[in-house]
């Protein structure tokens, strides 16, 4: 197992009642700070504890906050990819209760964003609903019709579908524009 021999002989030292009481008091202080400042992470909680006269390591604060599920969850700002408020016509959903049983019957398309160091890039993808394979895609820093059109052109070039393929999307402005529909 390639473990040091000392692991076999290690026995954790039992905590004394005073140490257990001090640990419980510390947990109570951390919980009180987290209730008072609900957006504080372990670094700010450590700083606040030091301000209040309790000097200890940030790693211990992190461990206690993790054990007590007191770490705040960071909500990332999501890029908006669908603009449903547009003047272009909307088309009915032809996929309701439809049984998909062969290739090139229904193509699904959507846009998502990918976070990179300098910001975001957008990915437009088209999937065949039967095989669930990506048949066309495009990546761009701009969220416009040319992104979706490039993915559609790739899908058409790869599959060369016959007439009657249903193209299903979220009907955002990129998919509903005259340039994309024609």
Image (tube, rainbow, N blue to C red):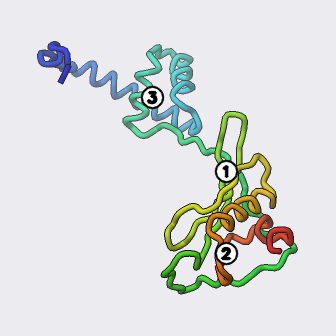
In the rendering, which numbered label is found on residue 167? 2
Cβ atoms at labels 2 and 1 below 8 Å apart: no
Vertical relation: 157 (above or below) 12: below
Which of these two is toward me, 25 or 149? 149
Which of these two is toward me, 21 or 77? 77
- The residue carrying mark 1 is 113
Q: How far from the left and from the top, in percent, is residue 170?
A: 69, 70
Distance between mark 2 and mark 3 Cα atoms: 58 Å
Residue 67 sits in quarter? top left
Whether residue 79 sits left or right of residue 46 in the image: it is right
Cβ atoms at labels 2 and 3 below 8 Å apart: no
Distance between mark 2 and mark 1 Cα atoms: 21 Å
Vertical relation: 20 (above or below) 133: above
Give the residue drawn at x 70%, y 60%: 151
Give the residue drawn at x 85%, y 75%: 88
Q: Given this view, does label 2 or label 1 mark the residue nearer the observer?
A: 2
- Which element type, helix, strand or loop, lies under badge 2? strand
Residue 117 sits in quarter? top right
Q: Given this view, does label 2 or label 3 mark the residue nearer the observer?
A: 2
Q: How far from the left and from the top, in percent, is residue 104?
A: 58, 75
Whether residue 176 sits left or right of residue 161 in the image: it is right
Which of pointers 1 and 3 lies earlier in the amino acid sequence?
3
Q: Given this view, does label 1 or label 3 mark the residue nearer the observer?
A: 1
- Which element type, helix, strand or loop, lies under badge 1? strand
Which of pointers 2 and 1 lies earlier in the amino acid sequence?
1
Residue 127 sits in quarter? bottom right
In the rendering, which numbered label is found on residue 29? 3
Give the residue drawn at x 76%, y 56%: 147
In the rendering, which numbered label is found on residue 93? none
Vertical relation: 7 (above or below) 126: above
């Amino acid at each position: 197992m390639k473990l040091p021999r000392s692991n076999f002989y290690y026995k954790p030292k039992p905590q004394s009642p005073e140490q257990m009481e001090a640990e419980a008091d510390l947990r109570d202080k951390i919980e009180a700070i987290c209730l008072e400042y609900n957006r504080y992470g372990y670094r700010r909680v450590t700083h606040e504890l030091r301000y209040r006269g309790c000097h200890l390591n940030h790693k211990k604060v992190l461990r206690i906050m993790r054990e007590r599920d007191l770490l705040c969850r960071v909500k990332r700002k999501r890029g908006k990819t669908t603009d449903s408020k547009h003047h272009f016509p909307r088309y009915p959903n032809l996929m309701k209760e439809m049984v998909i049983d062969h290739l090139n019957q229904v193509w699904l398309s959507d846009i998502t964003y990918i976070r990179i160091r300098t910001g975001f890039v957008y990915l437009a993808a088209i999937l065949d609903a039967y095989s669930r394979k990506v048949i066309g895609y495009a990546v761009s820093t701009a969220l416009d019709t040319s992104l979706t059109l490039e993915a559609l052109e790739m899908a058409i070039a790869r599959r060369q579908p016959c007439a009657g393929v249903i193209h299903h999307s979220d009907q955002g402005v990129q998919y509903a524009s005259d340039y994309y529909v024609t």
